[in-house]
Image (spheres, helix red, strand yellow):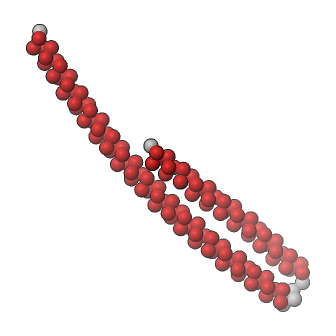
Amino acid sequence: LRRMNESTKEEAKNDTTTILGLIENAEAESKKEITEIQSALRMLEQRLLSVESSFSSTIASLQQNLSRQEERLDALGRPLFNLAAVERGLQDSDVRVSVLTSSLQDQIEQLRVAVEGIENF
């Protein structure tokens, strides 16, 4: 009976060691996956920041071009109603730019929150 008890204890010990090993392996794999996800999210965030920067540069360039065109129309003495139409077009463009910029900023913020959440995990 004593030998059976010792044998059972040894089997339980071996089983426990095996289970702990499996848990450690799973933890290591999870940490590796989290690190890969964090890296991918950082890369995505950098790409979005790059897109936002490019987008901002393009918007600034378009706004400069529109201003120059408005100045040319002014210099040519076009009727005021044409200038008003150009102004409305510029205002519409500004609204669209604001919406797109806001959307990009929201996406970047969501990515930052996601990266922080994963890092804190």
| Residue 23 percent coordinates (x, y) | 30, 35
- The answer to whether 12 appears left or right of 116 in the picture is left
Seen in the picture, residue 108 relative to 91 is either above or below; the reply is above
- The answer to whether 56 appears left or right of 87 in the picture is left
Q: Nearer the viewer, residue 71 or 86?
A: 71
Q: Quadrant of residue 57?
A: bottom right
For this orientation, the residue located farthest to the bottom is 76
- The answer to whether 108 appears left or right of 67 in the picture is left
| Residue 119 percent coordinates (x, y) | 45, 48
Q: Quadrant of residue 19?
A: top left
For this orientation, the residue located farthest to the left is 3
Residue at point 11%, 11% (across, down): 2
Residue at point 32%, 39% (across, down): 26
Residue at point 62%, 59% (across, down): 105
Seen in the picture, residue 99 relative to 16 is either above or below; the reply is below
Image quarter in which the N terminus is found: top left
Image quarter in which the C terminus is found: top left
For this orientation, the residue located farthest to the front is 120
| Residue 64 percent coordinates (x, y) | 70, 80
| Residue 61 percent coordinates (x, y) | 66, 78
Q: Nearer the viewer, residue 3 or 73?
A: 3
Residue at point 76%, 84% (across, down): 69
Instruction: Count the numbered circles shown.
Output: 0
